[in-house]
Amino acid sequence: MPAAKKQFKTIDQYIKTFPVDVQRILERIRQTIRKAAPGAVETISYQMPTFNLDGRYLVYFSAWKNHIGVYPVPAGDEAFQQKVAPYKGAKATIRFPINEPIPYDLVKQIVKFRMKENQQKKK
């Protein structure tokens, strides 16, 4: 997390506080989420980049010293659970190590499953 507990108003402000290599990862995650959920609205919640859809939070992401976090992890199906298993952290967190290739297709799947979960909650 960026030093000095800054109060961010935009995702751009958040991303700019990181080294350039991490900024590239964060921006690509942002674009992946946008493509997967074109109607989602960008915001900041809990001082993290957040996407909301239909008035509900969809997904959060953040950068840490050694990983990129994506929250929350949807239930998905068994095949999906096997894909996320190597990245699972505590409390419905996915942790992608910064020093390894980020599986952007998996980020897209996370968003798609979260959209389904939100739709089911709406009914």
Image: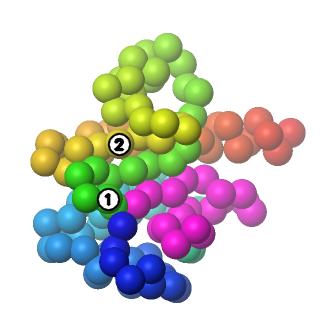
The structure residue drawn at horizontal position 44% and vertical position 84%, both measured from the top left corner, is 6
Q: Quadrant of the C terminus?
A: top right
> Is residue 66 something one can see in this rendering?
yes
Q: Position of residue 13 (x, y in %)?
A: 39, 84
Verify CB contact (< 8 Å) between mark 1 and mark 2. Answer: yes
Q: Position of residue 20 (x, y in %)?
A: 15, 73
From what the image shows, is residue 67 above or below residue 24? Answer: above
- Residue 69 versus residue 118: which sits nearer the camera? 69
The residue wearing badge 2 is 95
Query: Looking at the picture, which amino acid does disc 1 mark?
Result: Trp
Check residue 86 in the rendering and tell me which mark sits there, or answer none. Answer: none
Residue extending furthest toward the front:
4
Q: Element under label 2?
A: strand
- Compared across the picture, whether 9 is left or right of 70 comes to right
Residue extending furthest toward the right:
123
- Residue 17 versus residue 56: which sits nearer the camera? 17
From what the image shows, is residue 47 above or below residue 39? Answer: below
The boundaries of the magenta stretch are 45-62
Check residue 64 in the rendering and tell me which mark sits there, or answer none. Answer: 1
The structure residue drawn at horizontal position 59% and vertical position 69%, both measured from the top left corner, is 45
